[in-house]
Image (cartoon, rainbow, N blue to C red):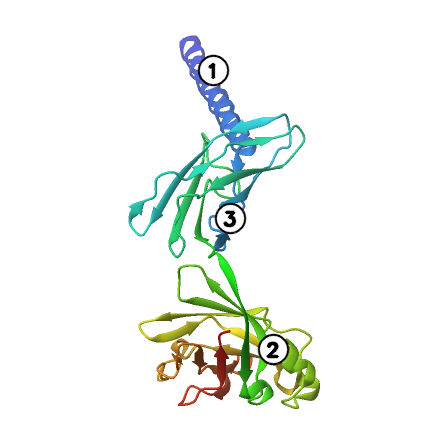
Amino acid sequence: MKYISKLSIALLSIALAFTACDSNQEGVIYSDAANAAAFVSASLADITVSPADPTFTVDVVRANAGSEQSGTVALTATVGDEPLVGCTVSGYTFAAGENMAKITVNVSPLEIGKELEVTLTLDNTNDPISGSNTVTVTVNKDYNWVSLGTGTFADILAFTEKPYNVEIRKAEGFDRYRVIKPYEQGLKNDDGQWGNAVAATSCDYIEFWIKDGIIYYNKFFIGINYDGSPSNAIYAYHPSSFSGTTLVNNKQLDDKTFQLAPYYYIEALEGGFDYTGEGGSILITLP
């Protein structure tokens, strides 16, 4: 009986020793994870950088704002399936008592008109308790916009066929243009007699480009709320956003004249005004 008792006590002691070791190890892992740096999200919204300053910053956070803490970040950058050499990323340093730090990414080698996929990975031994150890983001480099001078803009839905003088800019080296504040003056005069449906703001610019003979553009707000309700804002959509609509009436008419034929869409109502047919609704002339 004494032998059994001693053996039982010995086994119990070993078990307790292992339990203590496991608890200590878990404590170390938890502490490392709690102190680990993290990205708030695993992905970021698309970023556009300036050719003059092709950098952007990303926030890094930590749970415990203890002593000063520094670390490194790994970067991968690809255009399509090809690595882009020369992009760099800084390390991070949390000041004592601070929960947030910033890292700086430089994408100087990126060409204008190309999309760059960037993945950043922190140097954590263990994954953070919350957040993400990696983050991905799509990066574009903005065009170098050069003012061409004063052209004209008319939108027959917004304010009849009367053209207004507007500034026209061109992306240097590309068939890509911006019409600056196209609706500002026409809506101010309310030539379209929209009354209280005229919104307080409209798009800052319309950016359009030519591809395979078709003019393309992103959706833009024309500064009018259907029935005067802000929830019924009218946006001009490129017809490629909808099935069964023609694209061909978005075209260049001559050396200086461009025709846009959008579908004016009210997102909340899931409907709108179809101006995608021959003649379109918007005419833009270059200086």
Dot 3 lies on which element? loop
Residue on which the image places disc 3: 41
Residue on which the image places disc 1: 13
Q: What is the C-alpha distance between the residues marked 2 and 3?
A: 37 Å
Residue 223 location (% of width, % of height): 62, 78
Label at residue 183: 2
Q: What is the C-alpha distance between the residues marked 1 and 3?
A: 45 Å
Amino acid type, callout 3:
Ser
Q: Are marks 1 and 3 in contact (CB under 8 Å)?
A: no
Give 31 or 226, whichever is nearer the viewer: 226
Q: Are marks 2 and 3 in contact (CB under 8 Å)?
A: no
Q: Are marks 1 and 2 in contact (CB under 8 Å)?
A: no
Q: Quadrant of the N terminus?
A: top left
Residue 70 occupies which quadrant of the picture?
top right
State the residue at coordinates (46%, 40%). 133
Q: Of the two numbered discs 2 and 3 on the same chain, state the one appearing first in sequence.
A: 3
Give 154 or 278, whichever is nearer the viewer: 154
The reply to whether residue 204 is in sight is yes
Q: Of the two numbered discs 1 and 2 on the same chain, state the one appearing first in sequence.
A: 1
Amino acid type, callout 2:
Tyr
Please state if 174 lies on the left or on the right of 269 as rendered. left
Amino acid type, callout 1:
Ser
Please state if 283 lies on the left or on the right of 253 as rendered. right
